[in-house]
Image: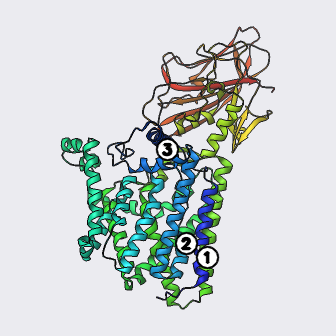
Amino acid sequence: MAKNKTPVDLLLAPLMIAVLGGLQIYFFDVTFHGPDQIRDMEVARRLVHAHEWPVNSPPMFGERITLPPGFYYLLALPLLLKDSDASVFIAFGILFLLSALYLWRQTSQAFGPHCGLVYATLALPLFPSIYAHSAWAPALIITFSNVLLGLYIRSASQEKAGWFALPLVFFLLVQIHPSAAPLLAGLTLYVLFHRRILADKRTLASVAIATAATAVWLVKSGAWARLAATGAPAAALQQPGHGWLANFLDLAKWRDALLMPYSLVTGIQPAMQPLDTLAAAGLAVMLAGLGLCCMLGWAERTVRWILATLAIWLIVSMAFLHQGGFWHLDVIHPWLAVAAAYGWSRFCDLLKIPRLGLRALAGAFFAIALSSHAILYRGMDRLGKMDWPISTMFFPQAPPSDIVVPSYTYRHLTAVREILDTRRICQDQVAGLAPMAMREATSRYFEPACTTAAITQPPAPRYFIATAQDRLRFDFTKGIEAIAVAGDSAVYAPQALDIALNGKRTATLLSQQRFNYMTYLPAHLEHGLQVTMPPGAADILLRLVLRCSEELPAHQPGYWRLEGASIARPMITERHRYLSLYYYDLEWLLSPHGSAPAVALSSLGEPMHCDVSAIARTAAP
């Protein structure tokens, strides 16, 4: 394969990577920031400020195992410069960009600038790029895998005898996420065929450092004692009822893993057209290049080892995992991208396609990547929130269900928090499904710290937060203007009635008891719920939201009992399933009876485990 240096390609490729990486850094706060990220940032801050040194990684596999704490120390480094979430996002974004440039350089030197040019168009995958600069542990998977593969290509192509950096990078990568562990089998096989590497002093020193660090961790963290008690580390990872062979032969899992880059994007709610078409085109480019590499890459020794390591990773991972998440595939993206780039460049060489033709092909690939990234980032910035059906996040896909994962961007969450803070709005003044879902998605991290008094004279103002889609189904926001907007969420300040929830004058009833670091338990309402409203001549619009631990017939009229008023029109309802909880968004139009001392809406009186959010106003705004 020709490896003549072509200055244009050597300029175009890093420019492409810089544009895609620059887009990520420009939208640095358009990334997810949920319970995992919030928990890990707190650990990193305690490390920096209180010198509390973590001895374990974030818990994994349902909190059944932990690894050495390398990720927390990496997460703390940007905080040493500036203690802000943004410093982490920007630093990780820059690292991601630099790692892609490093891998491009090694790819170009080993396989030629044409291969490097095609790799540049595939370097930043679509969906992972929106969390590759977040404070989530999988954010650094591709970054360190880029570096690992670059070192591997450099060693294999130049036939270097010693490995020093490579084992240490792998040691850190496994601490970031154990999905990298199967790469060890391919690396070990390479060393067995090139034994001079293992005999080199640099390799021995590197392995000794990693081994000593692991031994210290095993003792200090208590992991050794736990391993001795269970008998083997596999006990923590065992997946009952699923053997290795059955896992490996699960064709649905292979299919869904293959389509994951596409199905994740198509699962976004609301859809962002034509993002699904672009995602399909990007996946087709990657798979076609990979197929070409499998057919044409065997003549290149280094490519053979890349393909062998990839194949071993797939065999081990698919045999071990009964069901994997989308983040498990991040570690092999750089390997897939380089292999696909080599396949395309080798194919063009065989067809004797001129350089201009290959650049045009790479330009088309880059146009797909750039437009899809731009649409995704701008859509996330505009909406601030997206839902993902949980079934599309795993391979094989989970059984069809109505469960979705609500995901908010950091920019949106901070914008809503700033609106509330600048207007001195407390959490118990805010009603609506939107703030309740935000609480669920962020462990209440972004909520205002203040609370109003239980009894206020005059009553504290009430506010309502809803998306633009709300008035397409409900009437509560019709005829009133928002006082502030953040993304797709609007904050309203209606002339709210002074209502009481189970006798308490507030817009919310919430439990303060945690189930785990992610979830708060819903409030326990021993005698159900009663919403009390003052009497009046005008019709009342009542909006009620419930967050319940169990499914209730709350969206059915027969579940509620009304006193002091009659129903002017049938109730409007929506039911949502966010993660493991049930959400009910309900609206009534009530006509008060003139002689009634109050209007009361009550549940059937049975115990409920539900958080409550309610607000009411007269039907004429």
Amino acid on which disc 1 is placed: Leu
Dot 2: what SS?
Answer: helix
Q: Left or right: where does residue 439 sit relative to residue 468?
A: left
Q: Which residue is drawn at 24% across and 44% down?
A: 219
Q: Left or right: where does residue 231 sit relative to residue 617?
A: left
Amino acid on which disc 3 is placed: Gln
Q: In this orientation, does residue 125 appear?
A: no
Dot 1: what SS?
Answer: helix
Q: Distance between the residues labelled 2 and 1?
A: 9 Å
Q: Which of 53 and 284 is in front in this view?
A: 53
Q: Is residue 543 above or below residue 193?
A: above
Which numbered dot is residue 120?
2
Neighbourhood count class around disc 1 (C-alpha, 10 Å): few under 14, some 14–19, many 20 upward = some
C-beta proximity under 8 Å, tags 2 and 1:
yes
Q: Is residue 163 above or below residue 7?
A: above
Amino acid on which disc 2 is placed: Ala
Where does label 1 land, which residue? 12
Q: Distance between the residues labelled 1 and 3?
A: 35 Å
Where does label 3 land, which residue? 37
Dot 3: what SS?
Answer: helix
Q: Left or right: where does residue 506 sit relative to residue 321?
A: right
Name which of mark 2 and mark 1 comes first in the sequence: 1
Q: Residue at x 40, y 60 (%)?
A: 252
Image coords of residue 479 (percent x, y): 80, 33
Image coords of residue 578 (percent x, y): 52, 39
